[in-house]
Amino acid sequence: MLGTIFIQEEDEAFKKAGSFIYDKNCENVYNFLVRIFSLKKSFTDNISGVILLLNGKEKLVVNSNLIKNYVIPISRYIYNLRHEAIFDNRNYFFLNELIENNFELSSLLKALPKHIQKLVLSFQKALTIMEYRAFESVKNDNIGKRRKVRRNYNVYCYNIKITESPDYEDRYYVKPFTDLVDVIFCYKSLGDIMIEYDKRRYLKEVAVSEFDEIVDHRLEIFRYLAENFCPDVLSLLSTEKIKKLAYLSTFCSLKVTRLMPFLLDDRVQEFYQDAPNTNIYLDHEIYGRCRSNIALSKKELEVFLTHIKMDTGNFISFSSPSLKTDYITKMFKVRVSIDAPPVAIDGISIDVRKYRKKAFTIPELIKLGTLSAEAAAFLFIAAFFRLNILISGEPGSGKTTLLNAIDIMLPKIYRKIYIEDVVESIKQLDKGYHQLRLRVGSLERSQYSRSSKIDETIKILHRKPDYVIMGELQHREHVIAAFQAMNAGIKCIQTTHALNLEQLVLRFVKIFDIPMTLLSSIDVIVFMKRDLLRKDKKKVTFIYEKSKSGSCGNPLTMFSLVYARNKDDILKRVTPLEKSTTINKLSLENKIPMHKIILLIEKVKEIFKAYSADDYIKSHKLILRKIGELINENFQFSRVY
């Protein structure tokens, strides 16, 4: 029999605790309640009512006095029995005997402690007929109004449901993978037991372990702990659901149960919490800005800070209340920005940017409407021939995403050196690429840093890079480092913040005091924006190239427009490729006729359009192979792919 259990505390409304499977031929209701209540470490004495909704047809109101005087005390005893069964074989065998008897304590009366014997006997005398009523609606503040469900999917041990909202933000609801009350009650207990078990057996090892290592270790010991603590729950679950319970219990032991769904969901691009006890909101890959049902407490935020400190070595203090760092595990890769008092007035705030486990490919970005196939081909050829490229846009507009998509398309023979304050690049060493990644101090930690972008730029002069990925140019020092590299003959690709050419020039020339003549070091500038009101779509808006007739007296004339979005929101070419200064430069520097380079761009465009973005690995490898064949057949180069 399927049912739903509702619990009421004091004068509050009944709240849904979960669903259950009940066989009235095998166990009575009170023994059933003893069993499920014994899965939870502690229950408040303020329970004033329990309602069981059976098959959605009838409602069973359980005597509240018997709940307080019998079910709760005996459940506490059995919880302790479950707990000790992990460490004591005698208790383990007694627990299994109890389970076999469907928690009918009267059949095992002699084996029980005297105070529990008295409770059982007094219960038998006080037992009254339970009250069945016709189904009535049960107030439950978790249900609320029904909303249209946009999408429902699973992430590890969580269920994610996205629903329509009457306001501008869709709702992002997080729940455990099941609402089975047995699981809801036991996973927290298992998390606490994992902590205690490690304190007794593995304290030294866990004390020096990182997040990944602790997760792996606790997943390994889960089966032993669960088989001793709650074999009755495992018998209700499939192998797949037992694995999900293992993850849920492990996350609970690390005090990150409510944070993990946002870290694990690949469709979440970035999430934020402005202060403790305020709802997390996020940018979803498909549905844009959404508001979640999770509000982390101050304690939960501090636990997250502790994990970051233990795993990265970065920390927050009163004198240094802001932090930006990358946090990389086997399960997620994120960039974390945290502000704490006194700079954060309302308490700790977090901004966590997610990086896909697998970078976006250029065909995927074309499919998403970020840029056109021809513009993508133009940028790829510019990068293939190692031009100096600057990708600019507002925060969160997809600059690094586009940079990484270009980066993973570059030939394996290139020696690429990365200089980043936060690691946003894609590791490619295991795929046979030549890649040296350097991390310098971030703006928030500059006083503790041993190295800067300028320092590393000077050093790379003797490291013979083929292409340098400078990462994000955040402030004047970063911009100077980039121009210093480009004017030393080093080929660079980097990102910065500005919405259009005018803003970029003003920022570099007026704010950072960069001489106008240095701007001519940049060959191609890409501008991007985020369309926040249209599901936060990321788009390339303009692509500029160095102008042939530009004047240093007016820096805005130093660059001419090649691609621009029209009124139909399509990125179109506005300058014929035959007149492109970029194509002309590539022709002169590489001794290739212009018409051959233009033909190459056309063929690369067709390759991008031909291959589906749905199969990441297959399409990416096919594209690289096709482009490699195209280049190797048409140009007298050494083999590059």
Image: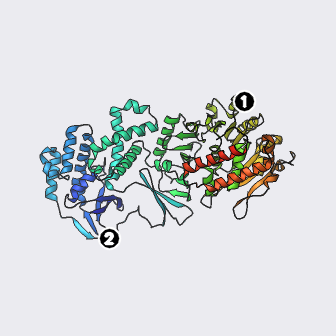
Q: Give the percent coordinates (x, y) of residue 488.
A: 77, 33
Q: Give the percent coordinates (x, y) of residue 291.
A: 52, 57
Residue 421 showing in the rendered view: yes
Dot 1 surroundings within 10 Å: few (below 14), some, or many (20 or more)?
few
Dot 2 surroundings within 10 Å: few (below 14), some, or many (20 or more)?
few
Residue 636 occupies quadrant:
top right
- Residue pictured at 14% horizontal, 48% vertical: 108
Decide which of 136, 234 is in the foreground and name it. 234
Decide which of 591, 536 is in the foreground and name it. 591
- Tell me how the rendering is colored: rainbow
Q: Earlier in the sequence, mark 1 or mark 2?
A: 2
Decide which of 359, 34 is in the foreground and name it. 359
Q: Secondary structure at mark 1?
A: loop
Provide the residue designation for mark 1: 461
Image vertical order of residue 13 relative to residue 212, above or below: below
Tag 2: residue type? Answer: Glu
Mark linked to residue 136:
2
Q: Secondary structure at mark 2?
A: loop
